[in-house]
Image (spheres, helix red, strand yellow):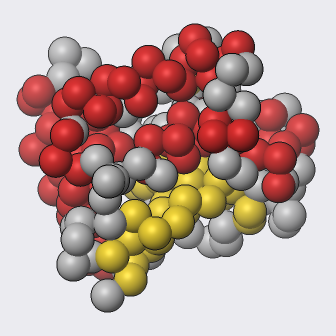
């Protein structure tokens, strides 16, 4: 059965690039959630004034990968203990957040945070927020890493994350 998950943890280009390489993931779409403005633009979200966060919507086959596995990958590919930032990306638009799509997902997310908190040196600050709406990001943000692998940010930030993912999560690699 096909399910969806929506998470944010820093720049959506990073999350998208990794989740596109996960076995059982059908589609990954970059977008915005959690704010007040309808149909926000990238420039508006980057200002930090909309309340939105950069997110990815992940469509996956739950017979090949579970929601829990999706969250396990999510917590390992960003630092869930950093408040409103990931590396040099700073602001509420980069906060660590999960938008559960139903009560079961919310329960799994809460359990996962409780289970992982003792593993990290600092407290997990990942928020669980209700989904009001998902707004697809502009087309030029979709498949960004695959379309621009030699761009500076992709080389310096995203490529090392992909390599770490490939090393740490071999069993989840697509193909």
Instruction: In this rendered view, identify the residue nearer to me: 17 or 88.
Output: 17
Give the x, y percent position of residue 174.
33, 53
Looking at the image, is 153 positioned above or below residue 172? above
Looking at the image, is 90 positioned above or below residue 134? above
Is residue 71 something that shows in the picture?
A: no
Instruction: In this rendered view, identify the residue nearer to me: 129 or 86.
Output: 86
Q: Residue at x 21, y 78 (%)?
A: 63
Is residue 46 something that shows in the picture?
A: yes
Left or right, 105 with respect to 33, comes to left
Q: Residue at x 48, y 63 (%)?
A: 58
Give the x, y percent position of residue 119.
11, 27
Left or right, 127 with respect to 17, comes to left
Give the x, y percent position of residue 3.
39, 78
* Quadrant in which the C terminus appears: bottom left
Left or right, 105 with respect to 126, comes to left
Q: Residue furthest bottom?
A: 1
* Quadrant in which the N terminus appears: bottom left
Number of numbered discs overlaid on the protein picture: 0
Q: Residue furthest front?
A: 175
Q: Residue at x 25, y 19 (%)?
A: 122
Looking at the image, is 1 positioned above or below residue 6? below
Q: Residue at x 19, y 15 (%)?
A: 121
Q: Quadrant of residue 126?
A: top left
Q: Quadrant of residue 108?
A: bottom left
């Amino acid at each position: 059965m096909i399910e969806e998950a929506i998470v944010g943890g820093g720049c959506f280009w990073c999350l998208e690039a990794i989740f596109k390489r996960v076995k059982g993931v059908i589609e990954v779409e970059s977008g915005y959630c959690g704010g007040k403005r309808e149909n926000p633009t990238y420039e508006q979200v980057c200002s930090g004034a909309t309340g939105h966060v950069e997110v990815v919507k992940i469509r996956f086959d739950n017979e090949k990968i579970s929601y829990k596995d999706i969250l396990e990958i999510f917590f390992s590919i960003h630092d869930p203990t950093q408040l409103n930032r990931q590396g040099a990306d700073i602001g509420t638009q980069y906060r660590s957040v999960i938008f559960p799509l139903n009560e079961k997902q919310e329960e799994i997310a809460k359990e996962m945070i409780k289970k992982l908190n003792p593993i990290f040196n600092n407290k997990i600050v990942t928020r669980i927020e209700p989904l009001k709406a998902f707004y697809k990001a502009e087309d030029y943000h979709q498949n960004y890493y695959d379309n621009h692998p030699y761009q500076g940010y992709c080389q310096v930030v995203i490529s090392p994350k992909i390599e770490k993912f490939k090393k740490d999560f071999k069993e989840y690699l697509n193909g």
